[in-house]
Amino acid sequence: MIDKDFLLTTNTAKWLFHDVAAHLPIVDYHNHLNPKEIYDNENYESITDVWLGGDHYKWRAMRAAGIDEERITGGADEKAKFDAFAETMPKLFGNQLLHWTQLELRTFFGIERFLSQESADEIYEQTNAALKEEALRPRNILSRQKVKFLGTTDDPTDSLEYHRLLKEDETFDVHVAPSFRPDKAIAIDAPDYAEWLGRLEAAVDFKVDSYGKFMEAMKKRIEFFDGMGCRASDHGINEMFYEEATEDEMEEVFDKVLSEEAVSRTEVDKFKTHTLISLAKEYHARGWVMQLHIGPLRNNNTRMFDRTGPDSGFDSINDKLVAEPLSRFLDAIDRTDELPKTVLYTLNPRDNIIMATMAGNFQSGDIPGKVQFGTAWWFNDNYDGMMDQMKTLANAGAFKTFIGMLTDSRSMLSFTRHEYFRRILCELLGQWAESGMIPDDRALLKEYVEDICYNNAKNYFGLEN
């Protein structure tokens, strides 16, 4: 199914992909890979382990296909879970999982046969045999995919032990950097907030008994992350917020949190707004990128949440209004000219044009594409979603400054998603060029592909050559 010209329908698209995009390195600036996995560099136990462990995309599809939970997140053995996924695949026409799976089989295992119930036994044996080889250890996978930079996702209290060990390893030339993810730091209404605050105190080695001390601790952790090569923050925002507050109000709210008093929704939003504005100015001072992932509706199924926990495939798209609070939030930081480089992602494709036009409000003459409308994310990182996101960005902004694709993945085999994105990008430019919508200028088209696939992200995140 996946031949060399997969998704490429014009001669221009084929040339752009095969002669330009296919050879470019990868900057994967947002993922959920475990740095310990990369440092230890051990062989994977099985294809089930590397494919299905923690992958809520696949779990969700398997449930929709009628697979029982025992063979998804339950106690079934690895072969049974693999067989269940193989049983699901023929039911996924139109779903990007089918494309991703076949790309991974072809790229890493040389398997071109379609995964199904009929081929499951053979593919299970072939992939498991290959996973025992040196070539499919984590570091070799990264080298094989020409990955130059990885931005992981890390809580402010993390020790970053394995980032340090990787940084000190002179035999390893992939830059694996932490990304500062303070979601738990601002979730003052979470039932386990006191427990998280205890971890923060242990990380900074002083008592956090006031809002002032809280911000002192957060700045200390930012400095620590910066010293470990951090280039970005990342923020998961279910609903965009904006409520102005004074420093005195923050002290009052934080005192309530420390005494375990209930806080109102308005107080929570004031805390989040005031704190993130302060953090954003710290990011700006260090040249970091601020990423805002906006719009999930999480943990919809209470019964299954109680059984499987968060991030198990029971999240969907939120429809809360975003334009006004996002505008006020960005403007509050920009008033003092301290808005960091910022990437705006939306989970709701309804809001694509809102994000693209919002980015245009806060651009800067000295940083091309300073505020980005980020790549199609989560439920949208499929063929149609990527096409729509790129067309919207091109309609409303400067397409050539786009920083391109990320995996947002927990699987070491997911880097073929960059190939998927690059094929779609080349197809889009090829269609435009051959229909006369843009100049059929091969030198300029080549620049577009090189910039969007690699150069822009490298420069935006301040990476060395």
Image (cartoon, rainbow, N blue to C red):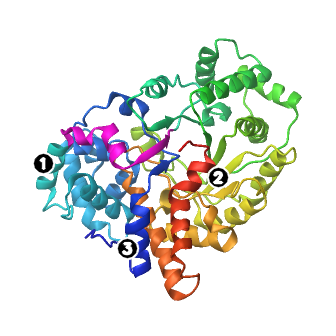
Amino acid type assigned to the residue bearing label 3 in the image = Leu
Q: Earlier in the sequence, mark 2 or mark 1?
A: 1
Please say if the residues under marks 2 and 3 sit with CB atoms less than 8 Å apart.
no
Confirm or deny contact between disc 1 and disc 3 (CB under 8 A). Answer: no
- Please give the residue where the numbered disc 2 appears in the rendered image: 343
> How far is disc 2 from disc 1 in space, using C-alphas?
42 Å
Q: Residue 140's image quarter? A: top left
- Amino acid type shown at disc 1: Glu
Residue 330 in view, yes or no? yes
Q: x and y percent of residue 394 in the render?
A: 63, 71
Q: Secondary structure at mark 3?
A: loop
Residue 268: percent from left, percent from top:
74, 37
Q: Earlier in the sequence, mark 1 or mark 3?
A: 3
Q: Is residue 177 above or below residue 402?
A: above
> Which mark's residue is nearer the viewer, 2 or 1?
2
Q: Which mark is residue 7?
A: 3
Q: Secondary structure at mark 1?
A: helix
Q: Is residue 174 above or below residue 259?
A: below
Q: Disc 1 to disc 3, how far (Cα)? A: 29 Å
Using the image as rendered, state which of residue 167 and residue 59 is in the foreground: 167
Q: Which residues are magenta?
A: 131-152
